[in-house]
Image (cartoon, rainbow, N blue to C red):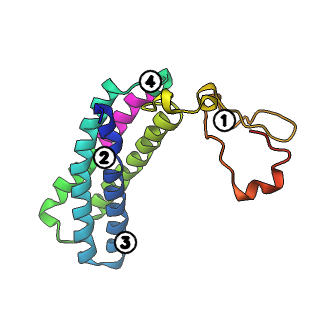
Amino acid sequence: MNTWELHPALVHFPIALLLSGVILDLYGWRKQREDLARVAFGLMVAGVTMGLLTIITGIMAYYTVPAHTEAAHERMTWHIWIQSIAIGVFGLMCLLRWKRRKSLATPQSLFLAVSAAVLLIVGSYLGAWIVYRGGAGVDPAILAPEVVEGHHHHHHGGDVDEDHDGDHHDGDHHHDDDDDHDEDHHH
């Protein structure tokens, strides 16, 4: 395993743990269920722990990941900062809540958790862009030549799809709902 591959191996855990924790905490608060609040808090503590490991591996990936675009590299910097702030806010919320961890979350704790969740989602979107649009970590040797050269979507009449830029690649996927358009739709 390459150093940069550690980050994508871990990245889904803090996202799943933290977002699940926030949703469960909100539900528990609304239903006034301390048992759900305790589980939610545990999920968020686990998420912060995994988030710290993921940040470390993300910084390692920043310096070691193979081929990627300049735009992807710029977004990597934003991704690291946004995710670090999100994990920091989640961590702060957990510290402030530690003594009351078996009780329902306060509105202030919920505000911090939801704010951190929004940051986490934005930072995660950037992470996805870095890989799927910026090519970070994708070995060009394993890609089909048509993907490396680029793929443009064409609508009826042959116009390039303006919603996709030149470095968008989605391969040649066939969908059942495309059957009506197969004769006119060209990949």
Placement of the C terminus among the 4 image quadrants: top right
Residue named by callout 1: 164
Given contact means CB atoms under 8 Å apart, are the residues at marks 1 and 4 in contact?
A: no
Secondary structure under the numbered disc 4 in the rendered image: loop
Can you say whether 119 is above or below 159 in the image?
below
**Mark 3 or 1: the one toward you:** 1
**What residue is drawn where x is 51% and y is 37%?**
132
Of the two numbered discs 2 and 4 on the same chain, state the one appearing first in sequence: 2
Label 2 and label 3: CA atoms lie apart by: 27 Å
**What residue is drawn where x is 27% and y is 36%?**
57
- Provide residue 4's location: percent of width, then percent of height: 32, 32
Secondary structure under the numbered disc 3 in the rendered image: helix
Q: How crowded is the residue under tag 2: few (<14 C-alpha within 10 Å), some, or many (20+)?
A: some
Residue named by callout 4: 67
Label 3 and label 1: CA atoms lie apart by: 38 Å
Amino acid type of the residue tagged 3 in the rendering? Tyr
Residue named by callout 3: 27
Q: Is residue 103 magenta?
A: no
Of the two numbered discs 2 and 3 on the same chain, state the one appearing first in sequence: 2
Amino acid type of the residue tagged 1 in the rendering? His
Residue named by callout 2: 10
Given contact means CB atoms under 8 Å apart, are the residues at marks 3 and 1 in contact?
A: no
